[in-house]
Image (tube, rainbow, N blue to C red):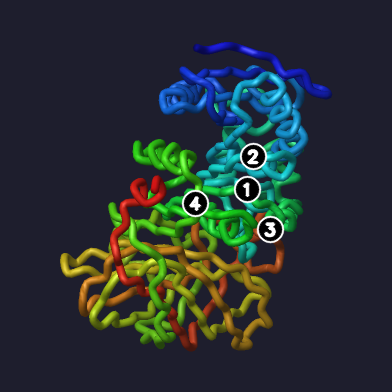
Amino acid sequence: MISQHVIDLDGARLGATVVRAASPGPAVLIRTPYGRHNHIAEAHGWAKRGFTCVLVDVRGRYGSTGDFVPYAHERADGAAVLKWLHDNDFSDGRVFAVGASYAAYCAVVTALEGELAGVITAVPALGLGETAREPGGAARLACRLGWWAEHGGTSAARATPLPYSLEALPVRAAFDIPAWQDLWDAPPLSPLWAELSGTDTPLLAVGGLRDPFLRHTLRLAETWGGPTTLVIGDWAHELGDKRIGALYTSWASSPRALSTVAVSSRFVRTAGKRGSPIRAVSAKRQFRAEPTRPFPSREVGVDLRCDAEREDRALVLAECGEGGVLAGLVEVEIEAVADAPDADWAFRLAVELPDGSWPQLGNAVVRHRHTPGEPTTIRAEIGPVGAEVPPKARLRLEIAGHHWPRHARNPHTGVDAVDATELLPSRREVLDCTLSLPWSDGTPVDVIKEVGR
């Protein structure tokens, strides 16, 4: 049974769709900026498994009135929607807040305002600053331009996104949308992080190895105060695996703590031991970072032989001995010199396989302030990665000055990358490099069976 509703709030009327389960039971609440009509099939899936599903368009989007200001109203509106849900007896008292990407933020802040049976987040986009920059300060580019061109300052996704250029400067001037400016001025972490440890609600956090916001999925799981389940799979920001739905419903039937990470098409436990730091051997130490021809970003899994002829990067190599399963964060420490006052350091890690390919395992970008010409220590965490490394394989770590178009080009002038109008080259040298590798025991796990116990 499907019914349509309007939820009256202060300054807005929210459109809601309720897909009822055949008998009384728990409810799932999904608040989305992407159109609740796009979640009808998902709602029916929940209802078939005994969960009434409540779909709500967030303020200012699709069937809801008011102004859509990203991240501004979701906490208060979530509290009001949760009260409305309870007042209308759509559940037996148990409510799960569920969401992916922006909707994951909606689920998280709802947990801070009311009692929930559980929270499910997938590839969460947890705030303006969190989506704008890497934890190390480097500015994201392609994914932010794409999202704001389609969704920024509008009540529905644009059929034709606003035009933009990845090369245009300054990045801040790309769109005449007030919230676009707020994006780049936002703090790296929103105030909600200080509150997460105080919740006792169970959490299922799902992250993708190829999702640009994976590190915040990890941070969410580490910070959350309640029982936490972390699952990381070989997914991008657009989840497309049918097993995800089964994972959700299995977990919601019995929330419990479990930590797993995906390796290829399998899952393995992450309880392996971190190896002692190993010193990598430099194959190429010096390079010139040229922002007019920036070093390219590639997706995890891409064969990096496509960039084998690039000279604008350092290269270090590390032998892996007997091999094994890498599952977790790879810690990198380099001693390096730059001739610029401000520089981005991009790291791409690959493994040389017996078939000759070099699939990328993970990457990281760190922004660093320099005293030009003086050696400094730079630390980065790549991943988490999930990979089976064969015996006698060799890891390849490329170190470059850009990671474009995934990240904006550092201009090497000291000006923030999003405000830069002048781009200068930068000479770099990597003096030393050590890696700390997260070796796992590789024990396979059937995640759905494990979570559903």
Say if mark 2 contacts mark 1, CB within 8 Å. Answer: yes
Mark earlier in primary sequence (2, 1): 2
Who is closer to the viewer here, 136 or 225? 225
Return the residue nearer the eye: 22 or 7. 22
Q: Residue at the spot x=74%, y=31% of the render?
A: 77
Neighbor class of circle 3 (other Cα within 10 Å; few <14, some 14-19, many 20+) is some
Q: Is there a contact, CB below 8 Å, between mark 3 and mark 4?
A: no
The residue under label 1 is 201
The percent position of residue 126, horizontal first and vertical second, equals: 63, 48
Spatial CA distance of label 3 from label 4 is 17 Å
- Dot 3 falls on a residue whose secondary structure is helix
Q: Is residue 314 above or below residue 415?
A: below
Q: Nearer the viewer, residue 61 or 402?
A: 61
Amino acid identity at mark 4: Arg
Distance CA(mark 1)–CA(mark 4): 11 Å
228 to the left or right of 183: left
Residue holding disc 2: 116
| Residue indicated by mark 4 | 256
